[in-house]
Amino acid sequence: MVREGKQAAPARPTVEEATGILMKNPHAVFQNATETLFQVVKNLTSHPDDPKYRTLKRSSNGFSSKLAPAVGAVRFLRAIGFVEQGSSDAADGVFTMEKPDAALLAAGKAALKAAVPEYRRLEEAARTAENAAAAKRLAELRELSKQNYAKRDAEDQAERERIMEIAKIEKWEKERQKDPNCVL
């Protein structure tokens, strides 16, 4: 329930939801983001009490080049327990985590590990569908080409037959003109 003057805190996204969104990125963006997020999770798991691993700056090179371009990366950080301080579009924004939740980190790690082969499977399925569509289109074009050749061949044959008929009539007319006894 929201009281006047106060807004409810936004619900924390789930790890599954965040990885599902991450999988919508292009291959290179997905790969960079998942590798970086996996390293963040690994560092938090290995060093849960070290504040250096519980703070991520939007202005850092790693964040701006690997996580910022990936749709779903910030959602994943929120899902594993990071809270954003400052404006989400400002370079001074910082993600902090008070106390790492081992279960959330384990779920995040597992979700990232599962997302990589699933992403490959989806890419392969998309390539297969694209190849099937291209093969279908090629078959349609080949059939159209056959129809066009058959039509052209039929028209050519009809023209040859018309010319042969004209030649036959002209030959008969010449024969008739040579024969003085022929009367029509």
Image: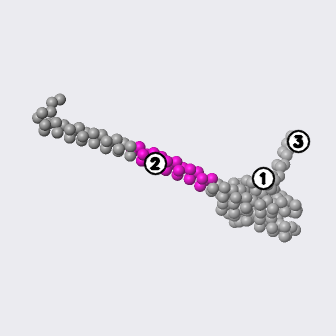
Closest to the observer, 68 or 143: 143
Circles 2 and 1 in contact, beta carbons < 8 Å: no
Q: Quadrant of the C terminus?
A: top left
As drawn, the label of residue 1 is 3
Circles 3 and 2 in contact, beta carbons < 8 Å: no
- Residue 150 falls inside the magenta stretch: yes
In the figure, residue 70 lies in which quadrant?
bottom right
Q: Quadrant of the N terminus?
A: top right
**With 161 as the anchor, is 6 left or right in this view?**
right
Callout 2: helix, strand or loop?
helix
Q: How far is disc 2 from disc 1 in space, using C-alphas?
A: 50 Å
Q: Which residue is mark 2?
A: 146
Q: Which residues are magenta?
A: 129-152
Closest to the observer, 140 or 122: 140
Closest to the observer, 75 or 25: 25
Q: Amino acid at mark 2?
A: Lys
| Residue extending farthest front | 181
Residue lying at 12% horizontally and 33% vertically, measured from the top left: 181
Of callouts 1 and 3, the N-terminal one: 3
Q: Could you tell me residue 61's position as x and y percent? A: 69, 66
In the depicted structure, whether residue 97 falls above or below residue 11? below
